[in-house]
């Protein structure tokens, strides 16, 4: 058994890699949808209870670089 990615287009599934199966060979397909990053992140956030999460102000004090950066001559 092997796992192969594909993209559905109408009633056709286009495989994203070659498989070593002869033409006409019957196969069994187990379909799992793949979420993109943002939908996975949203699903994670909805599954957690973040209402009681609190951060102390000190956590963010040195988070950002406050320097002005390099001098540029135009």
Image (cartoon, rainbow, N blue to C red):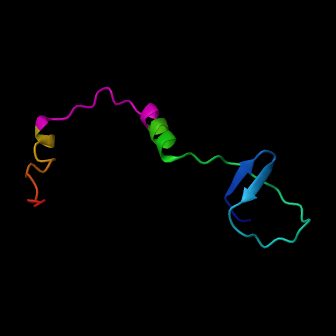
Chief SS of the magenta region: loop
Q: Which sits in the foreground, 46 or 71?
A: 71
Q: Is residue 59 left or right of residue 17?
A: left
Residue farthest toward the front in the current orientation of the protein? 74
In magenta segment, residue 69: no
Q: Quadrant of residue 71?
A: bottom left
Measured as percent of width and height from the top left, residue 10 is found at: 78, 44
In magenta segment, residue 47: yes
State whether residue 3 is above or below residue 22.
Answer: above
Residue farthest toward the right in the current orientation of the protein? 24
Q: Which sits in the foreground, 70 or 74?
A: 74
Measured as percent of width and height from the top left, residue 35 is found at: 56, 45
State whether residue 38 is above or below residue 67.
Answer: above
Name the residue: 82% across, 70% down. 21
State whether residue 74 is above or below residue 39.
Answer: below
Q: Quadrant of the C terminus?
A: bottom left
Question: What count of labels does the image hold?
Answer: 0
Measured as percent of width and height from the top left, residue 11 is found at: 81, 46
The magenta stretch is: 45-57
State whether residue 24 is above or below residue 11.
Answer: below
Name the residue: 11% across, 56% down. 69
Name the residue: 46% across, 33% down. 47
Q: Which sits in the foreground, 10 or 36?
A: 10
Name the residue: 75% across, 48% down. 9
Q: Which sits in the foreground, 6 or 52?
A: 6
Q: Quadrant of the N terminus?
A: bottom right
């Amino acid at each position: 058994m092997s796992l192969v990615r594909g993209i559905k287009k109408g009633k056709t599934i286009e495989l994203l890699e070659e498989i070593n199966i002869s033409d006409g060979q019957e196969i069994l397909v187990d379909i799992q949808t793949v979420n993109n990053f943002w939908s996975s992140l949203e699903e994670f956030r909805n599954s957690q209870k973040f209402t009681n999460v609190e951060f102390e102000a000190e956590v963010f004090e040195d988070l950002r670089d406050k320097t002005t950066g390099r001098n540029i001559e135009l």
